[in-house]
Image (cartoon, rainbow, N blue to C red):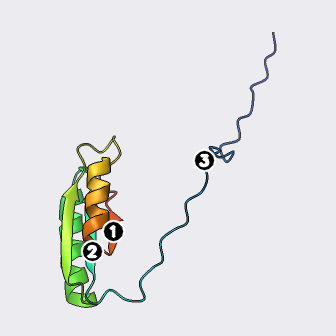
Amino acid sequence: MSLELGFIDPTAGTGRPRIAMALRPADLVGKVVGLLDNTKEQGRLILETIGVALQEKYGVARVVLKQKQHYSKPATDLIIQSMADEVDLAIAALGG
């Protein structure tokens, strides 16, 4: 019996093709920003505060706030598609 522990490379990737990141807007004036609450403690409060600041400081026209069902689960396809249809860019909360 070998007492050696095997090594697993955590950077080995999944084999899935990489998706290119979306182009970033030059500024936020007049944009609709989506904020995704991950349901962790203070996440909604943090996002509401960010939303107000984005409107006051950066000219964001509207903020759309949506919430995942649970922090341990990914956002549903419905939430993702709804955001994609409504907003120019989105921010996900990592509160907790």
Give the number of the disc on residue 16.
3
Which circle's residue, 2 or 1, is located before the other in the chain?
Answer: 2
Among numbered discs 1 and 3, the one appearing first in the sequence: 3
Question: Where's residue 61, x and y in %?
Answer: 20, 84
Badge 3 local density, few (<14 within 10 Å), some, or many (20+)? few
- Labelled pair 2, 1 in contact (Cβ < 8 Å): yes
User: In this rendering, is residue 60 above or below 48?
Assistant: below
Give the residue at mark 2: 33
In space, the residues marked 1 and 3 are separated at their CA atoms by: 23 Å
- Amino acid on which disc 1 is placed: Ala
Residue located at (81% from left, 15% from top): 2
Is residue 95 something one can see in this rendering? Answer: no
Tell me where residue 62 appears, x and y as whole percent.
Answer: 18, 79
Along the line of sight, which residue is nearer the eye, 41 or 61? Answer: 61
Which numbered circle lies on residue 90?
Answer: 1
Say few, some or many: other residues with alpha carbon within 10 Å of mark 2 (under 14 / 14 to 19 / 20 or more): many
Measured in 3D between alpha carbons, the distance from the residue under mark 2 to the one under mark 3, in whole angstroms, is 29 Å
Q: Secondary structure at mark 2?
A: strand
Residue at 22% from the left image edge and 51% from the top image edge: 41
